[in-house]
Amino acid sequence: MIACLVLVAASVSYAQEYKKFKVGVGIGYAMGSGEGSSGGVLITVEPAYRIKDNLSIGLRMESAAVTRGLSTSVAGASFDVAAIGSYTLNGQYYLGQGSSFRPFVGAGLGIYSLAAVTVTGNSMLSNAAAESSFGFYPRVGFDYGHFNLALDYNFVPATKAGTGEFKNNYLGFRVGFFFGGGKK
């Protein structure tokens, strides 16, 4: 009898108010770093699994089209827009429980695929070849119903280009919505 009570108490304490699986889709703005960088668009798909109501783990597949800047100022050079794709594992911790507005903090890490960059107008710099690199990001944001907003800063190692290097870090701001994952 006591074992049954312990089992019921344990299952009630781990009962979830939110559905376990969700898939988020988002679009936003990515701001490159470094001299001569400019922003562009990003698109994200994020499936996730809730371990508990306030903790989830997931994957982020993202593509950001930005003009990556240099580590130093270089006169007379221009750079093409180049995509940065990422495939990362992340976690989110929700600070609020039981309401439609749920702020969160989180972090992710994984592989970033960097497209080649073409340099024109400066002989001191060389084109940067496509490569893959390991990176990570901290993030903050909130869910409101099935709508979400997130801000993260992606730390990705720089790419060598002749006498300089391209900065691959970028700030991502996205809005989106998710399927599943809402209240039961």
Image: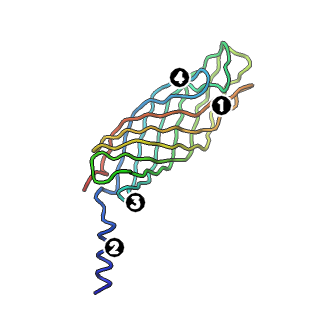
What's the residue at 30%, 50% (across, down)? 180
Q: What residue sits right under mark 3 in the picture?
A: 51
Q: What residue sits right under mark 1 in the picture?
A: 129
Mark 4 or 1, nearer chain start: 4
Q: CA distance from mark 4 to mark 1?
A: 20 Å
Q: How many residues crowd mark 3 within 10 Å: few (<14), some (14–19), many (20+)?
A: few
- Mark linked to residue 10: 2
Marks 3/4 in contact by CB < 8 Å: the verdict is no
- Identify the amino acid type marked 1: Ala
From what the image shows, is residue 136 above or below residue 130? below
Q: Depth-wise, is mark 1 or mark 2 nearer the camera?
A: 2
Mark 2 or 3, nearer chain start: 2
Marks 2/4 in contact by CB < 8 Å: the verdict is no
Q: CA distance from mark 3 to mark 4?
A: 38 Å
Residue 3 in percent (x, y) is at 32, 84
Residue 150 in percent (x, y) is at 41, 39
Mark 3 or 4, nearer chain start: 4
Q: CA distance from mark 2 to mark 4?
A: 53 Å
